Amino acid sequence: MQLLKPKNDVVFHCLFRKGNESITKALISSIIEEEIDEIELDNDRYLLQTYPDQKMGILDLKAKLNDGIICNIEIQLADKGYTEKRLLDYWSNLYSMQLKIGEKYHKLQKAIIILIADYDFGRLKEINKVHTKWQIREEEYFEKVLTEDLEIHIISLPKARKKNDKCNQLLQWLAFLDNPNNEGVKEMKKKNQDIADALWKLEEISEDEKLRKIAEVRERWERDELSAQDYWKENGLAEGRKQGLEEGRAQGLEQGREEGLEQGLEQGLEQGKKQGKREGREEGIKEAQLEIAKEMLKNEVEVEMIIKCTGIAKEKLEELKRKFK
């Protein structure tokens, strides 16, 4: 029988539920790199139940560790966006929910968020590490941490697959979570008792037909959601391109009209100046010719001679001659 994959968050919850504290302690300890003496798990995390209309939200595992430290573990198989903001939101809720009305801040305990992601996102793509730990640090004095109460661990399954350190406890757990059916994982149980216990418990829950159906529903829901995201992304891009083209065309037309009008005005002014100069010269010449003709008429010069000298039409000269009589 094929074992169910623990990175399916329904299987993950059933595997690391109340009653399986020892393997849960081993997993968390390999991540936060601290020994865990005490652990308390939520009592309502065994998810053998039906989901109406296959509607499932994000599932997370909550645990209380040494000295009241609270820890939240989540597995995500696909990037649903805004992962960094969601982690901060989870942490803030996990931290603030410790206080009841009227209680003082000194009762707040450390809150740890752990994300095991089957994808890389944001600035983590630039960091070649399987496991990154995040806190609030001073910009210049980087070694100074503002508070130990905030701690976020991000685990990259894609980066873990590229590693081949079989002695690393965390990498062993990640290989188990990723694919417990792998022969290499089955070999690990000979050297790692916690992995052996986890495999035994996984075999037990994998025989539960009801759980297998719920896990299948969960996987189908994840696939459908991702397909829907891809569909709307593609359609959104197409619609965006279309809308951008229309808006760009309208803006281009408006800009073209404005540039055309401005250029037309400049050209019109330039041509107007040239034409005005030409017409002005012609008008000046005509006025000068008329003045010459008038003087010649006063001096009783023959009309033919005036026409020859000024180029003024005979009719115009006859009209001017009548004005002088």
Image (tube, rainbow, N blue to C red):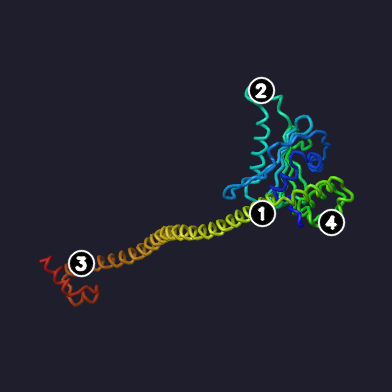
Q: Is residue 32 visible?
A: no
Report how far apart the C-alphas of labels 3 and 4 lie in the structure.
Answer: 122 Å
The circle drawn on residue 295 is 3
Query: Residue 31 at x, y = what percent?
Result: 79, 43
Disc 3 and disc 4 in contact, CB within 8 angstroms: no
Q: What amino acid does circle 2 point to? A: Glu
Callout 1: SS: helix
Q: Is residue 170 visible?
A: yes
Callout 3: SS: helix
Decide which of 135, 16 is in the foreground and name it.
16
Decide which of 131, 5 is in the foreground and name it.
5
The circle drawn on residue 184 is 4
Disc 3 and disc 1 in contact, CB within 8 angstroms: no
Front disc: 1 or 2? 1
The circle drawn on residue 103 is 2
Pointer 3 or 2: first along the chain: 2
Report how far apart the C-alphas of labels 1 and 4 lie in the structure.
Answer: 25 Å
Query: Residue 251 at x, y = what percent?
Result: 45, 57
